[in-house]
Image (cartoon, rainbow, N blue to C red):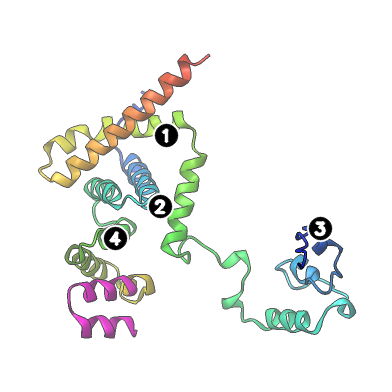
Amino acid sequence: MARIEPQDPRRLDRADPRERGAIARQLPRDTDVAVPLDVMTPEQMIGLASIIRRPPELSLGPQNVTPETLPAAEKAAIGVQELGRMDVTDLGYRIASLLVRREQDVARSTDAFVKAGFSELEDMARMFEHLMIKRTTAF
Amino acid sequence: MEKLPFADTPATRDQDVELLGRLAAAQMHFGNPRTALLFLKLAEFILPGQTATMRMMVDAEHRLRRPQQALEIILDLEAADGDAANDPELLRIKGLVLAMLGEGDAARSVLAR
């Protein structure tokens, strides 16, 4: 019976760097960097040449990535990440202050969606209140 | 006199709408478009006519399988913002929404743009 050798994760590290395209991966996005061409494979040279010839409006650099050009899903993901970085106390305070500010306006509104949204936000504020109480009483 | 933190000013309106947008984005991210839509409706109530809010509402209505409402917001958005008519993401949703409404030919022409 043939013995199946377990995959050694370090095997790739020992491989010839030209075979695993390490140089291409290490290249920064900025293309005006001196690279010894004799250590590059033909595929890597073609790749580099195509990056150099790419018109500036199609540049892959981070300078072209602005909030306006991002797809909606990525924008939403950034929003979620920013929320995740916020402190619980800060977020709870912001939501509570929003509720205090808008309570009277929403009470005057006849829109069921607005009232339901406000109610959801009140639930969220209660959750944050609970979290803060839990945090302050924990020892 | 020091301004109270709960005073209603244009700056606090912007902050509130931004916060509600982020909360809505989080709800969408975690697969809860209904709550996201409620937050967006509240944001629209606080500061009406914001294109960013309307775009997210289109997405939420589409995910909630409410094509008629999504189409109405898309048409409002196109009327408010000229660039919206050529936005690929909005065109994609518009095509899908028209297809859900049984408007196959219109959907095909929108998706082919």
Mark 3 lies on residue: A10
Q: CA distance from mark 3 to mark 4?
A: 45 Å
Mark 2 lies on residue: B29
Instruction: Please say whether residue B93 is one of the residues in the magenta stretch.
Output: yes
Instruction: Please name whichever residue, A119 or A99, is drawn nearer the observer in this view of the structure.
Output: A119
Mark positioned earlier in the residue sequence (4 or 2): 2
Q: Are marks 3 and 2 on the same chain?
A: no
Q: Position of residue A63 (x, y in %)?
A: 60, 65
Do labels 3 and 4 touch, CB within 8 Å?
Answer: no
Letter of the chain that mark 1 sits on in the rendering: A
Crowding around mark 4 (Cα neighbors within 10 Å: few <14, some 14 to 19, many 20+) is some
A97 left or right of B69 in image: right
A108 left or right of A29 in image: left
Q: Position of residue B113 (x, y in %)?
A: 34, 84
Residue that protrudes farthest toward the front in the picture: A1
Instruction: Provide the residue span drawn in magenta.
Output: B92-113
Mark 4 lies on residue: B63
Which quadrant would residue B57 be assigned to in this image?
bottom left
Which quadrant would residue A6 be assigned to in this image?
bottom right
Q: Residue at x 78, y 62 (%)?
A: A5
Looking at the rendered structure, the secondary structure element under dot 4 is: helix
Crowding around mark 2 (Cα neighbors within 10 Å: few <14, some 14 to 19, many 20+) is some
Q: Residue at x 22, y 75 (%)?
A: B98
User: Mark 1 against mark 4, which lies toward the viewer?
Assistant: 4
User: Mark 1 against mark 3, which lies toward the viewer?
Assistant: 3
Letter of the chain that mark 3 sits on in the rendering: A
Mark 1 lies on residue: A91
Letter of the chain that mark 4 sits on in the rendering: B
Which amino acid, by three-letter code, is at mark 3? Answer: Arg
Q: CA distance from mark 4 to mark 2?
A: 12 Å
Q: Are marks 3 and 4 on the same chain?
A: no
Do labels 1 and 4 touch, CB within 8 Å?
Answer: no
